[in-house]
Image (cartoon, rainbow, N blue to C red):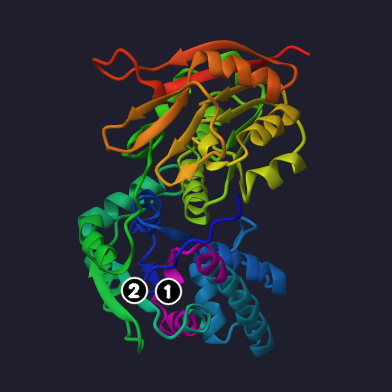
């Protein structure tokens, strides 16, 4: 199965989110834009910090780190030498170009957030790099998050409640200065928003909505899709996860892998061949990490048949709703057997929509989903015949159906637990 090349959006898009500290830039980006749209996100502050360290910029703050708003001003007001400023923007431009190339490769839009995007020269630099990377047709918009005085003070007090010093409320005069209109930059559409309700129509007009397939809830992330990942995950025995090295094969947006890590897996890996799904899995992981959820999942992009043999041995492997992607299903099963020391959870489906395994085995059930798409699922007899042939050393230990409401048989939800015995 070759690596799938995602089609880029009809018109490449870059959305810039800026505003004063505590305006809600990270919240809007991580909790909404990163989850609702087909995008790669990037933090300007992180790129600034990396570039400042690379060029050896002095640290002025007693915390031992950089205050990025102050550093952005120092780079422009002559505090730093022209040589250091030039080297900084060269390093920063490389980081920015790398992020843009990543978005192009994965066929997604790009969302960048940070205070420094309020500077016109910063936005002009982003525009130039975007045109070089995405092409001159790239659509660029910038949103100034400008909450009203009451909400801004609330955000500042909430964000800084743990600081040892008192956080004083912002005065109306300072608020007006902080949310004043941005200087125009040719080729960039400017917008103003007080909250996400104002951001949504702007994003809808610029970015592609992401169509979720996996439905799951973890921390602040809750998705809507036709595949109930929570129900499937509940069928995996806790002892097969806790303290184990686990891998989710063809993981899509990473729901099962993330749930396994949250349930105590010592190491969880997800392998996905679709760049857009892979990108979304990383965005979900980053959102969960920022919310304090243990989401340290290792995501790998590529053909599972090439990636899996390079990753060593696993205690537990999961392949749900993906076997039909492989014409040589027996070869895929052998590959899983060679990589697993403990157990494997597999759905034995052999054809669905445009994907068909070559020479489907005898003894399969044809089931038509509610969507109208037929799917062919192996019977118990078929599974018990296939496993010894293709997965030497494994036995069929348990079938775990998760029937839908009011249904006697739902073959496309049968997950088989296979246990290594030798």
**Mark 1 or 2, nearer chain start:** 1
Visible in this render: residue 113? no
Q: Which residue is mark 1?
A: 117
The image quarter containing residue 217 is: top left
Vertical arrangement, residue 326 with respect to residue 143, above or below: above
Magenta: predominant secondary structure element? helix
Q: CA distance from mark 1 to mark 2?
A: 8 Å
Residue at image point 37% right, 52% down: 27
Q: Are marks 1 and 2 in contact (CB under 8 Å)?
A: yes
* Residue in the picture at 52% in, 64% down: 45
Secondary structure category for the residue under label 2: strand
Which range is magenta?
Answer: 101-128
Q: Which numbered dot is residue 47? A: none
Q: Nearer the viewer, residue 192 or 384?
A: 384
Residue 348, percent from left and from top = 52, 26
Q: Nearer the viewer, residue 111 or 252?
A: 252
Visible in this render: residue 172? yes
| Residue nearest the observer in this picture, 35 or 22 | 35
What residue lies at 66% left-to-right and 15% top-to-bottom?
419
Q: Is residue 314 left or right of residue 115?
A: right
- List x then y, in percent, for residue 412: 40, 26
Number of numbered callouts drawn:
2
Q: Position of residue 10 (x, y in %)?
A: 36, 72
Q: Is residue 110 magenta?
A: yes
Q: Position of residue 400 (x, y in %)?
A: 47, 14
Q: Secondary structure at mark 1?
A: helix
* Location of residue 54 (image quadrant): bottom right
Asked whether residue 132 is drawn in magenta, I would say no
Q: Which residue is mark 2?
A: 142
Q: Nearer the viewer, residue 163 or 238?
A: 238
């Amino acid at each position: 199965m070759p690596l799938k090349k995602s089609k880029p959006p009809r018109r490449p898009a870059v959305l810039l989110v800026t505003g004063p500290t505590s305006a809600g830039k990270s919240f809007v980006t991580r909790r909404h834009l990163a989850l609702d749209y087909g995008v790669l996100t990037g933090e300007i502050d992180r790129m600034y910090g990396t570039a400042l360290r690379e060029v050896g910029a002095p640290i002025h703050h007693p915390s031992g780190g950089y205050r990025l708003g102050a550093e952005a001003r120092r780079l422009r007001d002559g505090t730093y030498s022209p040589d250091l400023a030039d080297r900084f923007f060269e390093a920063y431009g490389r980081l920015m170009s790398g992020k843009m190339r990543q978005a192009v490769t994965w066929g997604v839009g790009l969302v960048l957030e940070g205070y420094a995007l309020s500077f016109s020269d910063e936005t002009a630099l982003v525009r130039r790099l975007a045109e070089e990377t995405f092409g001159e047709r790239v659509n660029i918009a910038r949103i100034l998050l400008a909450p009203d005085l009451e909400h801004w003070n609330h955000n500042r007090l909430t964000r800084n409640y743990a600081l040892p010093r008192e956080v004083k409320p912002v005065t109306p005069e300072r608020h007006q200065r902080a949310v004043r209109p941005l200087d125009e930059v040719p080729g960039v559409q400017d917008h103003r928003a007080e909250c996400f309700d104002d951001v949504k129509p702007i994003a809808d007009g610029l970015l592609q909505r992401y169509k979720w397939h996996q439905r799951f809830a973890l921390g602040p992330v809750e998705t809507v899709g036709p595949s109930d990942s929570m129900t499937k995950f509940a069928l995996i025995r806790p002892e097969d996860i806790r303290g184990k090295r686990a891998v989710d094969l063809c993981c899509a947006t990473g729901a099962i892998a993330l749930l396994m890590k949250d349930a105590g897996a010592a190491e969880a890996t997800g392998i996905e061949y679709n760049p857009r799904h892979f990108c979304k899995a990383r965005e979900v992981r980053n959102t969960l990490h920022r919310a304090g959820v243990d989401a340290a999942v290792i995501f790998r992009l590529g053909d599972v048949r090439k990636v899996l043999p390079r990753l060593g041995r696993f205690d537990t492997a999961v392949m749900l709703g993906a076997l039909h992607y492989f014409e040589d299903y027996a070869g895929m099963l052998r590959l899983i057997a060679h990589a697993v020391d403990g157990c494997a959870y597999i759905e034995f489906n052999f054809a669905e929509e445009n994907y068909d395994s070559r020479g489907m085995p005898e003894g399969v059930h044809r089931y038509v989903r509610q969507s109208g798409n037929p799917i062919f699922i192996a019977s118990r007899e078929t599974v018990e015949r296939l496993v010894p042939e293709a997965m030497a050393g494994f036995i069929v230990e348990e079938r775990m159906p998760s029937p839908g409401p009011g249904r006697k048989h739902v073959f496309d939800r049968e997950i088989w637990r296979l246990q290594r015995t030798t």
